Image: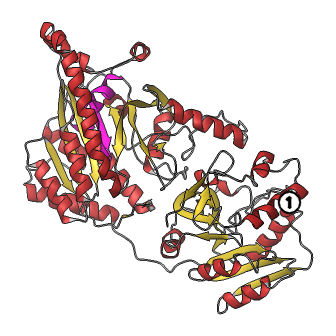
């Protein structure tokens, strides 16, 4: 006698372009479902009518689909360079996913499979993930987060997105971080099942994990960005390990141009199915009831660790009736059966009440601060002309300049309050002293937000239009950005010594008068902001910062000689990186604005 079918709820919050959404829905229909009872919970959060129509057609096609309208019309900015998320969008999606968890629990599903609507799945994905026996497991996919960068998986080991392993308190050199980072990427290219610290976007969650408390609720004393991080931290605290499977990587349609990859992906995955089917025909003829179990490929090492999550029926729990489930979901007394229109109206009202935008407060003041020395013939005029579009005031230390640096500051920032402090003798040989002076002068201006940039750093163009939303973010006191080292006007450098753009660094800080800011006293590389700022709630931004200071050969030679003078043994920095500055043939990547 064949075993009872596993009940699986596939959930997806959907705010998607029609072309990508159609491929996503077709991918769901191609999933193999032998031995499964498959239902869908889709939340229509679209702002394009065509996308909503596609969902309606999918729901009416005979599939067991619960389609719910969010009742919202939030703007979600995305292009071929990046996707921009703000806190409202993040926690709205977290609320959607929690509704799906509640429904899976209420109706006694064995598994909830949460998947983003820009993924295309291998047909064997779902059966295989169930066959791993893990309570929380994601199928891997790889993304080029910025044009011209390397492909990275959606899983990580610790913190926001650190893709290397490290023990608590372990101090790693940049060289060792690079080595472990590449080892992690190489491992995930080998088919297997690996324990990780964070995952998302294509995740199977067992009923056992849901019963244990897995959810996307925000953890108030953790400031990490994104609902997936809060889900993963909570799971780890509950003792539920997190795994990534790499047997059937999904295709991520992160950009419109990725649609060109879909036909080849379908052809290749369909060819695999045909080959497996032909190879197993004789065996299936001899043992038809055993065929379903053989559709999942698991290695011998994985099989030793498998523990299938028991269904509600196996645990002895009685699945609720539909009326009982509705009561549990709504937290309201049992009522008469609602019509479809009443259900949609109530759902929209609930969502609208939960996420109604508040009135927009005045934008907080933004203070630009920088240290400049003899920058008159470099990039000072260019960067100040850009900065004046969005700053409210500036505090600049002219550190012993002998050129027209001070005059350029006054000229370009005319009409904007400027506090210009001139050092007759440069303090750069003791950077800690210089940065303390800069901080003290900024504090005298009674700042709200402090943007600390060097005179050769400039944000990408869209920063001017997006900065307001960052300054109004009440839950965050520090924003971190990626810094790209430009080697000429149109290319940045990327190799083992130049990878700053793969990490996020602090540049934008809310000043808290009641916070005790502490400083690093190193004479070089002490940091431009206090060293304890990460005790404040902080977030990551996808807005990119361009560092122009390496973009001309003469500037690179000047910096090389400066480092050799002040830190010849690499005591405060990285000597191998110093030596690589004059590499005549570095690896350069084109920049796309």
Residue tagged by mark 1? 561
Q: Which residue is drawn at 28% across and 41% down?
A: 264
The colour scheme is secondary structure
In this orientation, which residue lies closer to the viewer: 225 or 209? 225
Total marks placed:
1
Rendered image quadrant of residue 76? bottom left
Residue 40 magenta-drawn? no
- Residue at the image point whose x is 23% and y is 37% from the top: 9
What crowding class fits label 1: few (fewer than 14 Cα within 10 Å), some (14-19), or many (20 or more)?
some
Range shown magenta = 104-132
Check the image and name the residue furthest to the bottom: 415
**The one of 510 and 334 positioned closer to us in this rendering:** 510
Residue at the top extreme, as displayed:
286
Residue 130 appears left or right of 178 = left
Is residue 306 visible in the rendered image? The answer is yes
Q: Residue at x 49, y 48 (%)?
A: 219
Q: Which residue is drawn at 81% across and 56% down?
A: 520
Asked if residue 488 lies left or right of residue 5, the reply is right
Percent x, y of residue 255: 37, 56
Q: Where does the image place residue 34, in percent across and percent down from the top left?
A: 18, 25
Q: In which quarter of the image is residue 281?
A: top left
Percent x, y of residue 262: 28, 46
Residue 223, percent across and down?
A: 55, 53
Q: Is mark 1 on a helix, strand or loop?
A: helix
């Amino acid at each position: 006698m064949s075993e009872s079918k596993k009940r699986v709820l596939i959930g997806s919050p959907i705010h998607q372009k029609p072309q990508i959404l159609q491929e996503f829905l077709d991918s769901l229909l191609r999933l193999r479902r032998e031995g499964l009872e498959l239902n869908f919970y889709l939340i229509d959060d679209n702002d394009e009518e065509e996308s909503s129509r596609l969902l309606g057609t999918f729901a009416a096609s005979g599939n067991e689909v619960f389609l719910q309208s969010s009742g919202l019309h939030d703007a979600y900015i995305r292009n071929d360079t990046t996707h921009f998320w703000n806190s409202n969008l993040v926690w709205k999606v977290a609320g959607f996913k929690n509704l799906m968890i509640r429904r899976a629990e209420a109706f006694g599903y064995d598994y909830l499979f949460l998947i983003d609507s820009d993924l295309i799945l291998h047909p064997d994905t779902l059966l295989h993930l169930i066959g791993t026996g893990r309570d929380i497991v994601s199928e891997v996919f790889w993304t080029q987060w910025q044009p011209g960068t390397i492909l990275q998986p959606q899983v990580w080991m610790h913190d926001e997105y650190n893709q290397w392993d490290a023990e608590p308190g372990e101090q790693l050199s940049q060289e060792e971080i690079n080595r472990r980072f590449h080892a992690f990427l190489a491992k995930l290219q080998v088919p297997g099942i690996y324990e990780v610290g964070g995952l998302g976007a294509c995740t199977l969650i067992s009923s056992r994990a849901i019963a244990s408390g897995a959810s996307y609720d925000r953890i108030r004393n953790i400031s990490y960005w994104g609902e997936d991080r809060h889900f993963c931290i909570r799971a780890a605290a509950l003792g539920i390990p997190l795994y990534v499977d790499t047997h059937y990587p999904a295709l991520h349609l992160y950009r419109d141009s990725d649609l060109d990859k879909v036909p080849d992906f379908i052809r290749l995955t369909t060819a695999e199915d045909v080959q497996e089917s032909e190879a197993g025909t004789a065996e299936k003829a001899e043992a038809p009831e055993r065929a379903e179990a053989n559709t999942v490929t698991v290695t011998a090492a994985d099989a030793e660790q498998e523990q299938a999550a028991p269904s509600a029926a196996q645990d002895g729990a009685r699945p609720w009736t539909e009326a009982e489930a509705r009561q549990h979901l709504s937290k309201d007394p049992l009522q008469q059966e609602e019509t479809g229109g009443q259900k949609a109206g109530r759902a929209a009202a609930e969502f609208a009440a939960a996420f109604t935008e508040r009135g927009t407060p005045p934008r907080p003041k933004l203070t630009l601060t920088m240290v400049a020395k003899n920058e008159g013939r470099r990039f000072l005029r260019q960067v100040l002309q850009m900065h004046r579009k969005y700053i409210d005031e500036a505090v600049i230390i002219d550190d012993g300049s002998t050129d027209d640096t001070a005059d350029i500051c006054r000229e370009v920032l005319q009409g904007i309050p400027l506090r210009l402090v001139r050092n007759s003798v440069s303090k750069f040989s003791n950077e800690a002293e210089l940065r303390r002076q800069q901080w003290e002068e900024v504090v005298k201006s009674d700042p709200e937000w402090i943007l600390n940039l060097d005179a050769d750093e400039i944000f990408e163009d869209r920063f001017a239009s997006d900065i307001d939303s960052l300054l109004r973010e009440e839950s965050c006191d520090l924003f971190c950005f990626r810094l790209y080292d430009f080697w000429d006007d149109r290319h940045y450098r990327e190799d083992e010594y130049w990878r700053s753009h793969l990490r996020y660094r602090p540049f934008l800080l809310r000043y808290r008068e009641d916070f005790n800011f502490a400083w690093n006293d190193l004479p070089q590389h002490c940091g431009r902001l206090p060293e304890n700022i990460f005790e404040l709630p902080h977030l990551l931004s996808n807005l990119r910062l361009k560092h122009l200071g390496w973009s001309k050969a003469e500037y690179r030679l000047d910096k090389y000689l400066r480092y050799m003078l002040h830190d010849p043994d690499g005591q405060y920095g990285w000597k191998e990186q110093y030596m690589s500055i004059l590499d005549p043939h570095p690896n350069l990547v084109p920049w796309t604005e």
